[in-house]
Image (spheres, rainbow, N blue to C red):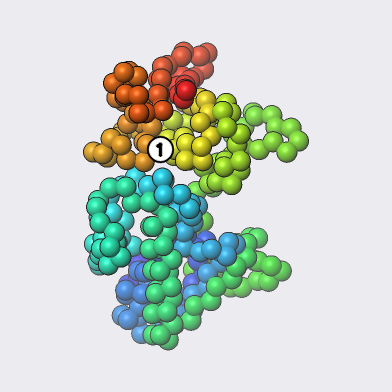
Amino acid sequence: MKISVMAKTNISHIAIIGCGASAVLILESLRDTAFSIKKKLSITIFERDEKMARGMAYRSGSDRLILNTLPETMSVSERQPDDFVKWLRSRGIVGKEGIPRKIYGDYLEEKLSSCIAALQRDGHKVTVYNTSVEAVTINEKHSVIFAGQKMTFDVCILATGGELREPENIALSGAQKILSIFDEEPIANIKKGSKVAILGSGQSAIDACILMESFGIEGYYTLVSRRGILPRVKSERADHCMQLSEMIAEKKARRDLGNDSNLLIVFYVQIMPDDLVMQLHRF
């Protein structure tokens, strides 16, 4: 919602459900423009995880998972598009490529803290509940139900991010589970040399391969994809973070890699009844 609309209406009680990157962007916008609003705002944030701001995408502790876009496009401030770049430079982090996602998570956490502090300093009320929202009802007002309580707001903003859903028609038994790229601890416990199926062949699939390599799993990975297309390589540094897509694209023979390398990626496409199965074999 535009701040100008808020200034001309009776909107003053705002609920934000979820506190990842999107919520930080919302709070940053409110902080930048709240001075033009004569009334004081009451902002309530609902987040079930104790660790806020990072969301799923930037909570990883791995240095190997990097941002898939340039830092110049990652500022949370509309007024200062170079804010993230300046933040990096102030911490001695240079270079346009290979910024780990966890570094951006640090940036988001710091921006969240500064936004809340600035809003409170200007007399606005900011309250955070570390709990799940059970339901939202919309009438003349927006009612949020959580932990046996009910609160009413003028505006309710959903900032919950993308929902991870397990694929349909996959039979699981016992304690079996479909892992996501965000399940780092279970992924780290995969036995070395395991055969792993990865559904999809986009950026997250490559991240999954990189993450398993960083944990020393050295397994046999099968990427199952409707289209069989790997993401476009953006980096100019072919050796950065062992990006599998770059090594696949090069398809060098073992003699070209030399004896110092213990990694050989064999890439081929096998036509299956329904999908293209891309098999990456490390040996």
Residue 139 in view in this figure: no
Q: Nearer the viewer, residue 141 or 186?
A: 186
Q: Residue at x 53, y 28 (%)?
A: 219
Q: Examine the image and state in which quarter residue 76 appears.
A: bottom left
Q: Examine the image and state in which quarter residue 50 appears.
A: bottom right
Say left or right for 257 vs 167. left
Q: Residue at x 41, y 62 (%)?
A: 106
Percent across and percent down for residue 7 are 36, 77
Q: Residue furthest right?
A: 174
Residue 150 in view in this figure: yes
Percent across and percent down for residue 86 are 25, 65
Does residue 90 lie above or below 248 as drawn? below
Q: Amino acid at mark 1?
A: Gln
Q: Residue furthest front?
A: 259
Percent across and percent down for residue 211 are 48, 40
Q: Nearer the viewer, residue 47 or 72?
A: 72
Q: Examine the image and state in which quarter residue 151 appears.
A: bottom right
Q: Nearer the viewer, residue 231 or 13?
A: 231
Percent across and percent down for residue 80 are 25, 66
From the image, which quarter does the N terminus lie in?
Answer: bottom left
Q: Residue at x 36, y 41 (%)?
A: 241
| Numbered label tally | 1
- How crowded is the residue under tag 1: few (<14 C-alpha within 10 Å), some, or many (20+)? some
Residue bearing the label numbered 1:
203
Q: Secondary structure at mark 1?
A: helix
Does residue 50 lie above or below 125 as drawn? above
